[in-house]
Image (spheres, helix red, strand yellow):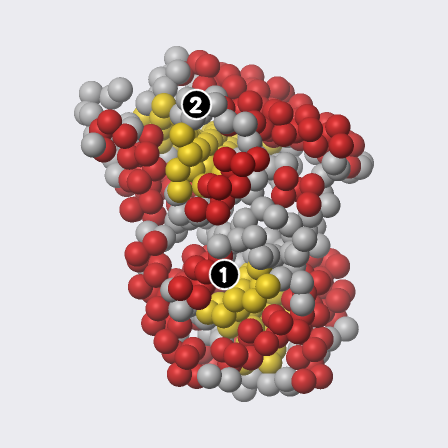
């Protein structure tokens, strides 16, 4: 423990940290808040999407020390090759991390699931530093990956589950996004008595975008001035419900010409989505833009889409909710029956939620907001209050530390 009992040396091991300060992730926000609270923060980040550049070290303006390690890129991307790389590459990266952390000590290690793709790194750090440890779980690997079709079942699934469970059991605390996530974790993973599971909500900044003229913002992005704009922003990848989003846009082209759809992001499905959008005059697709610009654009829109896929039993709680609340945009949520996200939307009166799997239902949620301006204004007002109460990164980061050191919190 550091000399000041209120100050911790924290190591974060994650594949979810972004290089660009223009597009920070959940874990950029968490590390930055830890630093603002006076803790000494070190991040080891695995850059699965980047080029093979070896190790890169730097220090953020807030004092966070960062090591980026990038796995070699695959020339051929078969499922078998991806699975082999996913499991084995951490052994190649472990040596870089060991050199970086030589002669260090830590009070708390925070890791982020999936842990399997960082297996060697996580095992080494937990055994080397023997301090308190906290695993943050958001997607229930490998269950969710199998159900959305990005991972095979059978033997591969069983091995992945065994590895993930063993790594989770090495931690003192596991944090899940909601009560239903917590129930799913306890019923699907054979956790030992040593490991505690807690609810830890998602988090993010609570500052709002600066007021801007909606017409000026829309003109900047060549968007219609006189139509209601429905926006989706985020990773363009499997499991995000894009068939449903595009289906709702096609229906709207016939039934609701007053609606226009905007999709912003990047990912494996970007080209496919762009081709689909080209066939529809009421859809625009834009690449990812810096977060502050994105928030300003969000605030110039009328409805934000949160969409998952049917046929899965893993409870999800999409992180894009944070930005929608910051911008005060009502949410049209199309989510699986097994999540408590729909209850969150309804209970906090920040949007309309329907069950995933139907473009007609999603369009109905959108029009329920657009066609009731008074209700939409109430949702905008509720967004800010909900953001401050539930998702403030300052509150959540301190809750994580309190869950890691319950004897100090008491």
Q: Which mark is residue 304?
A: none
Instruction: Locate residue 222 relative to residue 319 in the image: left or right.
Output: right
Residue 10 versus residue 193: which sits nearer the camera? 193
Query: Label 1, on which residue?
Result: 342
Q: Give residue 121's position: percent from left, percent from top.
A: 53, 22
Quadrant holding the C terminus:
top left
SS of the residue under disc 1: helix
Residue 76 versus residue 401: which sits nearer the camera? 401
> Which residue occupies 55% across, 73% down?
365
Mark 2 touches mark 1? (CB < 8 Å): no
Q: Give residue 394's position: percent from left, percent from top.
A: 30, 46
| Residue 35 showing in the rendered view | no
Q: Give residue 54's position: percent from left, percent from top.
A: 59, 27
> Which residue occupies 54% across, 49% down?
315
Residue 229 versus residue 246: which sits nearer the camera? 246
Identify the mark nearer the N-term, 2 or 1: 2
Could you say which quadrant of the image residue 388 lies in? bottom left
| Residue 402 showing in the rendered view | yes
> Which residue occupies 72% across, 39% down?
151
Instruction: Locate residue 239 relative to residue 300 in the image: left or right.
Output: right
Cα distance between the residues tagged 2 and 1: 32 Å
Q: Give residue 168's position: percent from left, percent from top.
A: 51, 27
SS of the residue under disc 2: loop
Query: Label 2, on which residue?
Result: 193
């Amino acid at each position: 423990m550091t000399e000041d009992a209120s100050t911790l040396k924290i190591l974060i091991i994650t594949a979810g940290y972004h290089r660009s300060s223009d597009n920070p992730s959940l874990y950029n926000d968490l590390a930055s808040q830890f630093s603002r609270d006076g803790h000494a923060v070190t991040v080891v980040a695995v850059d699965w999407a980047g080029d093979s550049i070896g190790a890169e070290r730097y220090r953020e303006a807030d004092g966070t020390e960062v090591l980026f390690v990038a796995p070699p890129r695959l020339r051929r991307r078969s499922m078998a090759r991806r699975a082999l790389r996913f499991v084995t590459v951490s052994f190649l990266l472990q040596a870089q991390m060991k050199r970086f952390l030589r002669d260090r000590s830590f009070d708390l290690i925070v890791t982020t699931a999936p842990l399997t793709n960082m297996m060697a790194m996580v095992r080494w750090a937990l055994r080397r530093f023997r301090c308190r440890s906290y695993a943050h779980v958001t997607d229930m690997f490998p269950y969710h990956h199998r159900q959305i079709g990005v991972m095979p079942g059978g033997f591969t699934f069983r091995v992945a589950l065994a590895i993930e469970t063993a790594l989770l059991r090495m931690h003192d605390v596991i944090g899940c996004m909601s009560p239903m996530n917590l129930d799913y974790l306890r019923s699907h993973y054979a956790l030992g008595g040593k490991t505690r599971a807690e609810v830890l909500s998602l988090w993010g900044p609570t500052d709002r975008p600066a007021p801007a003229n909606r017409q000026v913002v829309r003109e900047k992005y060549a968007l219609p001035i006189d139509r209601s704009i429905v926006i989706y922003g985020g990773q363009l990848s499997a499991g995000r419900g894009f068939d449903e989003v595009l289906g709702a846009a096609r229906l709207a082209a016939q039934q609701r010409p007053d609606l226009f759809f905007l999709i912003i992001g990047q990912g494996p499905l970007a080209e496919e989505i762009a081709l689909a959008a080209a066939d529809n005059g009421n859809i625009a697709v834009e690449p990812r833009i810096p977060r502050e610009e994105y928030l300003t654009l969000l605030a110039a829109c009328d409805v934000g889409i949160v969409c998952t896929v049917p046929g899965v039993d893993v409870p999800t709680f999409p992180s894009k909710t944070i930005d929608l609340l910051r911008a005060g945009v009502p949410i049209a949520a199309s989510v699986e029956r097994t999540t408590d996200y729909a209850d969150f939307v309804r209970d906090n009166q920040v949007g309309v939620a329907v069950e995933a799997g139907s473009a007609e239902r999603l369009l109905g949620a959108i029009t329920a907001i657009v066609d009731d301006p008074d209700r939409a204004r109430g949702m905008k007002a509720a967004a800010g209050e909900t953001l401050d109460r539930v998702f403030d990164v300052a509150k959540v980061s301190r809750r994580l530390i309190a869950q890691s050191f319950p004897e100090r919190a008491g």
